[in-house]
Amino acid sequence: MIKKFTIVAAVLSLAGCAHVRQEDLDAWVGQPVDLLDKQPVFLTMQSVRTITADGTEIRNYVNGAAVGSCNGSGSVSSGGFVNSATYSQFSSCVARLAACNNIFYIKDGRVQRYTPIGTGGMRCYTNEAMRPNFSGPANVL
């Protein structure tokens, strides 16, 4: 349990040191959607696509992880076995998705805007690997 917490804390603290660079966002404005379809970093992420009433396509490339924590008090003294009702009396767990939502607005086959939004305590970051024509080495993030 402590090992999992340490790993999650390390990931979140590394993300906290990074930041979103405006030049990385601006690099996408006006680019053909074909480049986004082939961009290697975004290809590794789960994505959600929606279309607005005016025909704007919105793509969200989700870079995230499920984060959970449990708190509790009391003790178990029934020979090591406990039923779920007893367990719920002294343990409380919370799960959430910490993610950077990389949101792209697309109209007429061109990227209009790229907006990263962090949720669940995750801070977004950008770098050269997230630009339209990136084809560099692996392990850049």
Image: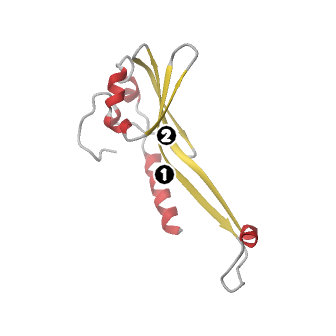
Q: Secondary structure at mark 1?
A: helix
- Residue furthest to the bottom: 79
Residue 73's place in the image compared with 138, above or below, is below
Q: What label sits on residue 12 in the rendered view?
A: 1
Residue 48 drawn at (x, y percent): 50, 33
Q: Residues within 10 Å of mark 2 (few under 14, many from 20)?
A: many
Task: Residue type at mark 1: give it.
Answer: Leu
State yes or no: discs 1 and 2 in contact (Cβ < 8 Å).
Answer: no
Which residue is drawn at the image coordinates 39% and 19% (left, top)? 29
Instruction: State the quadrant of the N terminus.
Output: bottom right
Q: Determine which residue is flagged by label 2.
A: 100
What is the tally of numbered marks visible in this picture?
A: 2
Q: Secondary structure at mark 2?
A: strand
Label whose residue precedes the other's in the sequence (1 or 2): 1
Which residue is drawn at the image coordinates 58% and 45% (left, top)? 120
Instruction: State the quadrant of the C terminus.
Output: top left
